[in-house]
Amino acid sequence: MGKTYDELTDAHQAFIAAQHVFFVATAPRSDAGHVNLSPKGLATFAILSPRSVAYLDYVGSGAETIAHLRENGRITILFCAFEGPPKILRLYGRGRVVEPGNSEFAALRGRFPEGNGVRSVIVADLSRVADSCGFGVPLMTYTKDRTQLPDWADRKGEDGVRAYQRDKNARSIDGLPALAWVDADTTR
């Protein structure tokens, strides 16, 4: 039987720390817009407090989460156990995007491992925490993190990654503005 909480318990925090992957869901206001669901990994999740979490957002082929958060702030983060006892943990809240250049960025960025290709830090203030059984989630064994994304960013270099973001991350697939620095560059 699932339970709801106002904040993360110590047991929730230990469960999160043991997971290698999590999923982020956001959606635009428009019924015609696309709901986005993205898998995340690479040791990119941090618990800021029992009611606030953050994750390191690497450059990607789209910027749906960023665009949706800029538009309406709604976010759900899901963790599920692929190893050990079955469990699903959902974190509901309001998210915001902290891009390089923002006064908060350096302090938040410092909570994560070094690496190239960082696009932003996503911060979510939690309004609801819910866990459930996860009986339908298969058992799978973690082998290791993939290296393709950090390797790609290293090969591109800072200027190449920035150019890629300007080209691929300016707008969502529904045409919503995404990265604020790209908006600023294009309106000058």
Image (tube, helix red, strand yellow):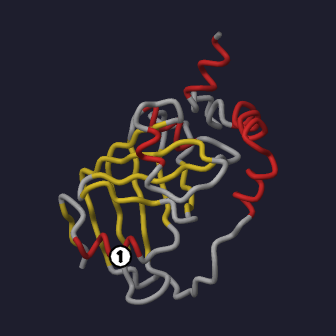
In the displayed image of the protein, which residue is found farthest to the right?
155
Which residue appears at 35% of the width and 54% of the height?
53
The spot of residue 97 in percent (x, y) is: 46, 38
Quadrant in which the C terminus is drawn: top right
- The local crowd at label 1, few if under 14, some if 14 to 19, many if 20 or more residues have their Cα within 10 Å, is some
In the rendered view, does 118 fall on the left or right side of 135? right
Towards the viewer: 149 or 104: 104
In the rendered view, does 114 fall on the left or right side of 83? right
Which residue appears at 53% of the width and 35% of the height?
100
Residue on which disc 1 sits: 15
Quadrant in which the N terminus is drawn: bottom left
How many labels, in total? 1
The spot of residue 41 in percent (x, y) is: 56, 65
The spot of residue 187 in percent (x, y) is: 63, 12
Q: Circle 1 — which element?
A: helix
Towards the viewer: 90 or 47: 47
The spot of residue 164 in percent (x, y) is: 75, 38
In the displayed image of the protein, which residue is found farthest to the left?
6
In the displayed image of the protein, which residue is found farthest to the top?
188
* Residue 160, picture quadrant: top right
Placement of 36 over or under 91, stated as above or below = above
In the rendered view, does 38 fall on the left or right side of 3? right
Which residue appears at 58% of the width and 83% of the height?
142
In the rendered view, does 95 fall on the left or right side of 144? left
> In the rendered structure, which amino acid carries the disc numbered 1?
Phe
Which residue appears at 32% of the width and 48% of the height?
93
